[in-house]
Amino acid sequence: MSIEQQLRDKLQDCAEAMENPSEMQKRIQETSYTRYRNEKYKAKSKLKVRMVACVLAVILLTPVVIYTGPVVAAQIRALLNLSGTEDVRSFVTKDEDSDYVTTNLYADEISENKAAQEVLARIYRGFPEAKDFDIASAQIAKGIHGGERIHQLNVILMEKGKTFAETHKEVVANVDVDTGKIHFVQTIGIEPFAQHPSKLQESEAIAMANTFLKQLDVHTEGYEPEVAGVRADEAQGVDQAIIIYKRAADGKAMFQVNLQAGSTSVAYIPSEKS
């Protein structure tokens, strides 16, 4: 499958997952793909970069739905491959139920931001090799999103010397700035991960998920893990196993771990989704 087709597929998946007006979805897809095509020929456009930044923020803020693999990081990589958001300082996202500002952080702001330093320290403890990674993107989104108040930090760490267009190791994290609570973390090309998650025994999948959570200092005591879904689709390039962690006391689903080919992620389930 060509890179153009892969990108179109990723953007289509992203648009379908977002609860936005159909016209906005169409605009996002068309503008993002145009940005990719123009970048191939070294064309520059600040307007299109701004749209890519907006789409990135929307993807990071979109809740991960239970029983569907979080393809968030894959979508982020596809979008950032179009260029970055470095020349865009901040932008506003506003519609009927959202009004928030996303600000790209400078290096000194990252070093002075408590939430950023805490999540970086947590990642470095669990995955020491990430200490040598570059901070490819750091953004704070603050305001109202989907009718709820948010104050979130989005960080992407990438293997030094690599670009988003190349095969590389990567960590994506989304946390609450005020509480430090993790919303989403995904590692790419970093152990533990499985090459063929759908072929794992349930006990193997749960053991791998527990190891990943332990590296992130996520405690699993009081939770019952359950392999909720396994999917292998060579045509779509999907191979994954989903492990749901339910609170033992009441059976309420709290977070899920997705084992995908070459990557592992954890996403906390919004209360209305559980």
Image (cartoon, rainbow, N blue to C red):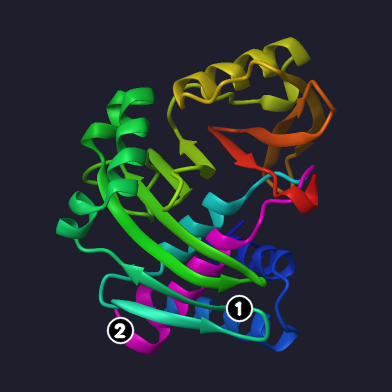
Residue 176 percent coordinates (x, y): 47, 51
Q: Main secondary structure of the magenta part?
A: helix
Q: Quadrant of residue 153?
A: bottom left
Using the image as rendered, state which of residue 221 and residue 130 is in the foreground: 221
* Quadrant of the drawing holding the C terminus: top right
Using the image as rendered, state which of residue 22 and residue 234 is in the foreground: 22
Q: Which residue is mark 1?
A: 98
**Residue 87 falls within the magenta-colored stretch:** no
Above or below residue 89? Residue 243 is: above
Q: CA distance from mark 1 to mark 2?
A: 29 Å
Element class at badge 1? loop
Residue 40 percent coordinates (x, y): 37, 73
The residue shown at (31%, 30%) is 124
Residue type at tag 2? Lys
State whether residue 7 appears in this view.
Answer: no
If you read the primary sequence from the N terminus, does the residue marked by circle 1 or circle 2 appear first?
A: 2
* Quadrant of the drawing holding the N terminus: bottom right
Boundaries of the magenta span: 39-67
Residue type at tag 1? Ser
Using the image as rendered, state which of residue 59 and residue 198 is in the foreground: 59
Q: Quadrant of residue 128?
A: top left
Q: Which mark is residue 44?
A: 2
Above or below residue 88? Residue 154 is: above
Element class at badge 2? loop
